[in-house]
Amino acid sequence: QVQLVESGGGLVQAGGSLRLSCAASRRISGISSMGWYRQAPGNQRELVATIRSSGSTNYADSVKGRFTISRDNAKNMVNLEMNSLKPEDTAVYYCNAEINFGRLQSFWGQGTQVTVSS
């Protein structure tokens, strides 16, 4: 099994910045992609940003230009730098990893709360 351990998050005023980090609990080969998703109360979980092992990235339109995802393949870590935060960014943020164990499996972190006050 693989555990994803998240850190960061918290309370920040609108316009501020936060950094989220996520690390796999053990060394793993075959991580296809890592990323961040978020879920606000009453809403479905939605993609924020993903990064593949090649370094290619994908962002939700709502965060483009404000959020930056990065990855340390050697440490099996993924980070999300969030700038110019808005109250609508308030949500629980979940780390995700897609890992090839013969077939692609998806793993999730426990979630970390991000609250942006106006």
Image: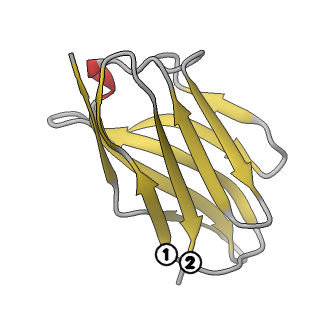
Tell how many labels: 2
Using the image, tell me which numbered label, if any, was put on residue 84: none
Mark 1: amino acid: Gln
- Give residue 43's position: percent from left, percent from top: 22, 33
Residue 45 visible at all: no
Q: Residue at x 54, y 78 (%)?
A: 2
Q: Which of the 4 quarters of the picture holds residue 75? A: bottom right
Q: What residue occupies the far left of the structure in this picture?
A: 42
Task: Judge left or right: residue 108 versus residue 12.
Answer: right
Give residue 50's position: percent from left, percent from top: 61, 41
Residue 4: image x %, image y %? 50, 68
Q: Residue at x 74, y 56 (%)?
A: 72
The disc label shown at residue 3, or none: 1
Residue 84 falls in which quadrant of the image? top left
Check the image and report above or below for 111 versus 58. below
Query: Residue drawn at (37%, 40%), measured in percent from left and top?
Result: 38
Residue density around tag 1, few if under 14, some if 14–19, many if 20 or more, within 10 Å:
some
Q: Are marks 2 and 1 in contact (CB under 8 Å)?
A: yes
Q: Residues within 10 Å of mark 2 (few under 14, many from 20)?
A: some
39 or 72: nearer the eye?
A: 72
Which quadrant: the C terminus? Answer: top left
What kind of element bears circle 2?
Answer: loop
What sort of colour scheme is used for the picture? Answer: secondary structure
- The amino acid type found where label 2 is placed reads Ser
Q: Secondary structure at mark 1?
A: loop
The residue at which mark 2 appears reads as 25
Is 25 drawn above or below residue 90 in the view shown? below
- Against 15, residue 19 (above or below) is below
